[in-house]
Image (cartoon, grey):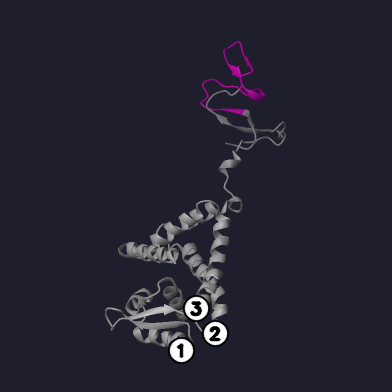
Amino acid sequence: MGTGSPNMRPRDGRFCLGGQLPIWSRPESRLRDGRTTGPRGRSGVNDPFASGIFWVTKKQKYVNMADIIISGDRTPREAHESAAPAGEPIWDVIELLFFAYRDFVSDPDEVLAKFAFGRAHHRVLHFVNRNQGMKVAELLDILKITKQSLGRVLKQLIDQGYVVQKEGANDRRQRLLYVTAKGEALAMRLADLQTARIARALAELGPGAHDAARRFLTALLDADGRDDVLRFIARADRARRST
């Protein structure tokens, strides 16, 4: 197809093209001998092609803007749901758990540092305070640390008057652990700091957040140990309510 005539300038949103067509594009008149004259007076009989001009309209195409996805306009949920390809690690949750835990323990860390204690001391205080009279073997199973590591921490807490160790009433080989009034006060101070952070987070999320958080954290536990953990927590709750 040829180009349009230089004199055929665009107008009213249209432009003109000239070309060879297999039919007359715009016959203007019929001669006496039966021939027709085409554009610009050109004519022919049984010509397979004839020159012609035709107008092409340039109109704006309607586009539904809802079909146009602009990355900057995505909601946070849409952005992260489409960001990770199949098989890619769930980086956001992995890293949010890391940073959440970092900040969660930072509040009690500041208090513990004043006593030259660390997170191992905090864990022992927490579980002994929640489970007065618990066995050393049970604490070892919860913390998943060696006897030597636990022994060093317990010695410091006992020597400084935060924890006491007693023999079992029926089995003198058992070592049962209790917090003192001093130990309970420190354990509750640390728990109050962490409770304040959790309460702020739950308040931001609104109704049902507590239950949703419990379900999510429970689902993260190994399936074969979930029931034991939930029973352990429930037992400690019952014991505290009874005191």
The residue identified by callout 2 is 115
Position of residue 224 in the picture relative to residue 43 (left or right): left
Residue 139 drawn at (x, y percent): 36, 76
- Graded by Cα atoms within 10 Å as few (under 14), some (14 to 19) or many (20 or more), the crowding at tag 3 reads few
The residue identified by callout 1 is 159
CA–CA distance in space, label 1 to label 2: 13 Å
- Graded by Cα atoms within 10 Å as few (under 14), some (14 to 19) or many (20 or more), the crowding at tag 1 reads few
Q: Is residue 221 above or below residue 125?
A: above
Label 3 element class: helix
Residue 161 drawn at (x, y percent): 48, 85
Residue 113 location, quadrant: bottom right
* Of pointers 3 and 2, the one earlier in the residue sequence: 2
CA–CA distance in space, label 3 to label 1: 14 Å
Q: Is residue 179 above or below residue 197?
A: below
Residue at the (61%, 35%) spot, across then down: 62
Position of residue 128 in the picture relative to residue 76 (left or right): left
The residue identified by callout 3 is 181
Q: Nearer the viewer, residue 48 or 135?
A: 135
Type of amino acid at the residue the image marks with label 3: Ala
What predominant SS class does the magenta segment belong to? loop
Front: mark 1 or 2: 1
Residue at the (36%, 87%) spot, across then down: 148
Label 1 element class: helix
Which residues, given as a range, are shown in magenta? Answer: 26-52
* Of pointers 3 and 1, the one earlier in the residue sequence: 1
